[in-house]
Amino acid sequence: MMDPKEIDHIGIAVDDLEAAIAYYQNTVGAKLVHREVIVSDKVEEAMMEVAESFLQLLCPTEPDSPVGRFLAKHGPGLHHLALRVDDCAEALDAFKTGGHRLIDETPRPGSRGTTVAFVHPTASFGTLIELVEERPSA
Ligand code: CO
């Protein structure tokens, strides 16, 4: 069984990143702590600190992308739950061993120098799960 350390962040798909940042700043006092375009995923993220955790606002850089397709199908809204783990490969193995459907068969680079892997929502009662390992850069 995997042993998550905390809920690392909650991913929210948005179609207007500037408006979404302003909304979370002005309503819940969220603090913008990081912005990054993840070229491989065709998405721009804005990490917003809220209390002791983070909201990850995700806006596609083009429609033909994972978040772009999500928006086309569902509209803006909750996209994924990210669990922080010590070892992404080991955590992914726990899902693999259970025979659960995966999106990533092996861990890959995420934003902020993290290592990540996604488990398919059909494995987790409709919620896309991201496993996040924050390995200090060598
Ligand atoms: Co995420």
Image (cartoon, rainbow, N blue to C red):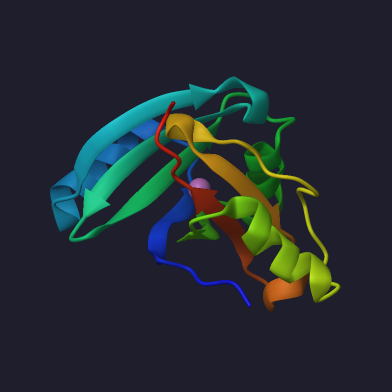
Viewer-proximal residue, 61 or 130?
130
Position of the C terminus by quadrant: top left
> For this view, does 49 lie left or right of residue 69?
left
Vertical arrangement, residue 28 with respect to residue 44, above or below: below
Viewer-proximal residue, 40 or 104?
104
Which residue is at the far front? 138
Vertical arrangement, residue 68 with respect to residue 55, above or below: above
Q: Name the image quarter holding residue 2.
A: bottom right
> For this view, does 91 lie left or right of residue 133?
right
Residue 40 image point, x, y percent: 66, 24
Q: Residue at x 56, y 40 (%)?
A: 115
Residue 77 image point, x, y percent: 50, 57
Q: Residue at x 31, y 53 (%)?
A: 54
Viewer-proximal residue, 114 or 81?
114
Q: Residue at x 74, y 61 (%)?
A: 120
> For this view, does 118 lie left or right of residue 76?
right
Q: Residue at x 49, y 40 (%)?
A: 58
Q: Name the image quarter holding residue 99.
A: bottom right
Number of numbered discs present? Answer: 0
Viewer-proximal residue, 115 or 41?
115
Residue 1 image point, x, y percent: 63, 78
Can the viewer see residue 121 in this picture? no
